[in-house]
Image: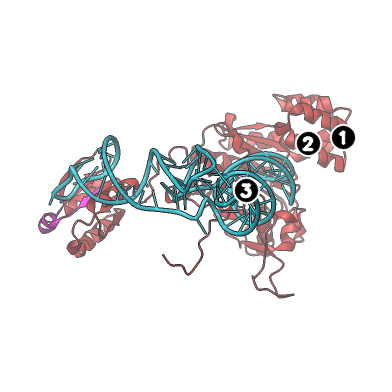
Amino acid sequence: MTDSFKLVGAVSGFPEYLPKQQRGFAEAVARVQAVYEAFGFTPLETAAVERAETLLAKGIEAKEVYGLRRMAAEGSEGDKDIALRFDLTVPLARYVVQNQNELVFPFRRYQVQPVWRGERAQAGRYRQFYQFDIDTIGDGALPLAADAEVLAAGAKALQALEVGDFVLRVNNRKLLAGLLRWAGFAGDDQTMAIKLIDDAEKVGWEKTEAALAALGSKLSGPLVQVLRAKEPLRVLQEVELDEEGRAGLTELQQVLALAKGMGTAETNIRADLTIARGLDYYTGTVVETRLAAAPELGSIMSGGRYDNLAANLGKKPMPGVGISIGISRLCSWLLAQEPYASMAASPAAVLLACQDETLLPHYATVAQQLRAAGVKLEQTFGGKLATQLKNADKKGLRYALIIGEQEAANGTATLKDFANGTQEVLPLDEVAKRVA
RNA sequence: GCGACCGUAGCUCAGUGGUAGAGCGCUAGAUUGUGGCUCUGGAUGUCGGGAGUUCGAUCCUCCUCGGUCGCCCCA
């Protein structure tokens, strides 16, 4: 150990995995990726940083955004307008506007990258975390079917992850706005009311109803009844909505019907008028998702329709719709579940042990032959055999190959199976077949 | 950014105003080419850092740094 640098702990809120967990995370990512590619979403990565101006354009709180500068930057010396992205949607909007002549619309992309937020770290809440997003961006117009498609793809992704029961709770901002106007909220009061509704599950509906009344609604009681109704779409027939509200209702009904038509199970999706979403760029469909097995995680997949996000950056309207899986937070629970929990720390299936260091040239040949035959094989180069085997078992390798003087001389190997403790001596060219 | 709690072995933690312990892990052996189980032995600590009180502080006080949880916000 050198003393040429000072070793200090990892920074809180910037999680790092152990090998086994990292493989679990990679597995989760691969499963989601496979689903999204089946829908034709194409992979994309964007830069970790954006211009601060771009990030802050949408009324995001500046205190949550990390700025970037060189340690020794002086005065007006560059880089001070650069900041780390806090989500993947805003960078996507910028990317699409910038490359609109090269892209084919509607543009479907998936993106799994870290984002950064300047908050205090807590359980399942990090300052650096991965999001796994899909979005579809239209050129001028984007049909409602695109909303349904991202919901259906997201639901399939969660199934592929084997998260158990879950529900996509879908609402529509236009409908919610109409409903709030019906209840007497307009302008800033409407924004406040949305925040109150967003908080309701945490603080309780009684308090929320009182707060809504205090905010000036004569209809806070009926409003809460409608919001919480078991079958909100039926109850809404009784409410006299304005034109925008009715349009939102129609959109919501269509999106649900289309998503089900695209294969989303009846039990995995439903209308929920209490879903509001904090971010103010949503204009239509909004969705949050909760796991039955882990409700404490909150929403692990959320998103919605934003008709104007890209319009701020370019001239043409570029409506988009997308959902984001909070895969770091999800994994804080998921990696303790099967099949992730019993995942091996090593990707290798076979340990080629070193029984005798003078045989290393022979081992090298054997290793190459087995890898060429498709065997994932890890080698040790010395040490006690017992320790080699112990470590291989601990890392989750299924087999060990032991080759001593005698085996080397007659072209065989002892194959040990950790799963049941058995072992047998085999000709080398049968080993690959046996461990396949 | 605000509030509460916590910092003792690699990890999880116990403990006392008289300079420290358990479990797990690590390691050696029982078991001379063989892991997981069992048994026996061994190593490991600036008791987070600094200052103060005291004959003496890991323990009491203050400051500081770090962590956890809650609020805000959200994945």
- Residue A129 place in picture, x, y as percent: 58, 51
The colour with which the image depicts chain A is: red
Asked whether residue A203 appears in the rendered view, the answer is yes
Q: Residue at x 72, y 67 (%)?
A: A81
Residue at mark 3: A121
Give me the disc on residue A215. Answer: 1
Mark closest to the chain's N terminus, 2 or 1: 2
Within the magenta stretch, is there residue A116?
Answer: no
Tell me which amino acid carries mark 3. Answer: Ala
Tag 1 subunit = A
Tell me which amino acid carries mark 1. Answer: Leu
Q: Residue at x 68, y 43 (%)?
A: A144
**Which numbered mark, 3 or 2, is in the foreground of this view?**
3
The segment highlighted magenta reads A400-412
Report the Cα–Cα distance between label 1 and label 3.
Answer: 33 Å
Quadrant housing residue A96: bottom right
Task: Check contact, mark 2 vs mark 1: CB within 8 A.
Answer: yes
Mark closest to the chain's N terminus, 1 or 3: 3
Q: Secondary structure at mark 3?
A: loop
Asked whether residue A131 appears in the rendered view, the answer is no
Mark closest to the chain's N terminus, 3 or 2: 3
Q: Secondary structure at mark 1?
A: loop
The colour with which the image depicts chain B is: cyan
- Residue B52 place in picture, x, y as percent: 65, 55
Q: Residue at x 80, y 36 (%)?
A: A245
Quadrant housing residue A278: top right
Residue at mark 2: A196
Task: Check contact, mark 3 vs mark 2: CB within 8 A.
Answer: no
Q: Nearer the viewer, residue B35 or A290?
A: B35
Q: How many marks?
A: 3
Give the quadrant of the N terminus of chain A.
Answer: bottom left
